[in-house]
């Protein structure tokens, strides 16, 4: 099974480049499934139903999210009604939506789990404890991808080791900065600390750099806007064997031209 994973899609620039390139990338890599983190899809913060529909229509099979998932209230019922968009598993059970998804692909079933890291993001439960419950719910599903949306590299590396041999891939998101450590761990789990961002690089993490600089220089609040130039799609392609162990993880960065 070939899974294409796209890191945090930022605003219209990220959505538009994904629309332009996804058919070609699916063909190039022979992808059986597409997973994309959509937590910044709407104006850089959160995701609304219109943009979730847009991503699903483009061919994204599962949308994962993160700390901004509840920014837009309109998404609450949508999260309950649409099994292909998930929120972090380790939030309060009373929050809208669910923390995992199972889809059928041409190469078999794929489970996707979304987890939120502890540092700065304050989930209801430790991701290290909660992930056990998620895997129990996925009993019988051999291919499993975990999107670990977290700030700290230590938490992400540790989660990779915890889940090595139990899931097919642990891919980090949230920092918007792609790390150079993609590899398959000894137990067969593809791992990457952060897959990066699908959005404008002429920015600070997707936001207009002038605004972020002004905030740092003046220490006054500033309304952030999504930048527009030098847009890239970043992520990784993961090849999973029939036994659920990964054979290969290959990061990619695809520009507009
Ligand atoms: Fe993000
Ligand atoms: Fe985030």
Image (cartoon, grey):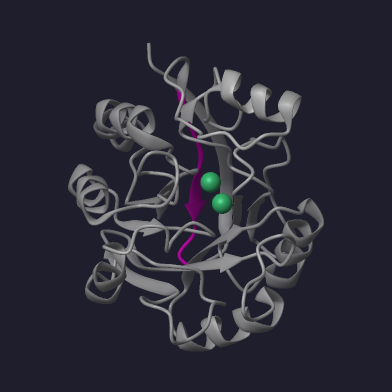
- Residue 23 lies in the magenta stretch: no
Which residues, given as a range, are shown in magenta? 232-242
- Residue 237 lies in the magenta stretch: yes
Left/right placement of residue 205 relative to residue 164 reads left
Picture layout, residue 246 above or below residue 192: below
Rendered image quadrant of residue 204 = top right
Q: Residue at x 37, y 77 (%)?
A: 96
Residue 239 image offset from top left, x and y in percent: 49, 50
Picture layout, residue 149 above or below residue 197: below
Q: Nearer the viewer, residue 253 or 75?
A: 75
Left/right placement of residue 35 relative to residue 204 reads left
Q: Main secondary structure of the magenta part?
A: strand
Q: Residue at x 42, y 40 (%)?
A: 9
Residue 85 image offset from top left, x and y in percent: 33, 63
Q: Nearer the viewer, residue 84 or 227?
A: 227
Quadrant of image for the N terminus:
bottom left
Quadrant of image for the C terminus:
top left
Residue 144 image offset from top left, x and y in percent: 49, 68
Residue 251 image offset from top left, x and y in percent: 57, 36
In the rendered image, the residue lying farthest to the right is: 154
């Amino acid at each position: 099974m070939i899974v294409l994973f796209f890191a945090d899609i930022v605003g219209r620039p990220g959505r538009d480049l994904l629309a332009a390139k996804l058919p070609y990338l699916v063909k190039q890599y022979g992808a059986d499934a597409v997973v994309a983190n959509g937590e910044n899809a709407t104006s850089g913060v959160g995701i609304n139903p219109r943009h979730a529909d847009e991503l699903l229509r483009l061919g994204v099979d599962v949308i994962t999210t993160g700390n901004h998932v509840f920014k837009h209230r309109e998404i609450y019922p949508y999260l309950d009604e649409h099994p292909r968009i998930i929120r972090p598993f380790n939030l309060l059970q009373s929050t809208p939506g669910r923390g995992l998804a199972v889809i059928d692909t041409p190469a078999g079933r794929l489970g996707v789990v979304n987890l939120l890291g502890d540092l700065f993001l304050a989930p209801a439960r430790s991701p290290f404890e909660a992930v056990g419950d998620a895997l129990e719910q996925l009993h019988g599903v051999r291919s499993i991808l975990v999107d670990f949306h977290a700030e700290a590299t230590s938490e992400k590396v540790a989660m990779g080791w915890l889940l090595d041999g139990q899931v097919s891939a642990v891919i980090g998101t949230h920092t918007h900065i792609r790390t150079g450590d993609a590899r398959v761990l000894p137990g067969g789990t593809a791992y990457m600390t952060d897959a990066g961002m699908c959005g404008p690089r002429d920015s600070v993490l997707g936001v207009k750099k002038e605004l972020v600089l002004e905030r740092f220089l003046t220490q006054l609040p500033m309304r952030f806007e999504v930048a527009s130039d030098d847009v890239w799609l970043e992520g990784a392609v993961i090849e999973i064997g029939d036994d659920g162990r990964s054979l290969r993880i290959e990061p990619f960065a695809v520009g507009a031209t």
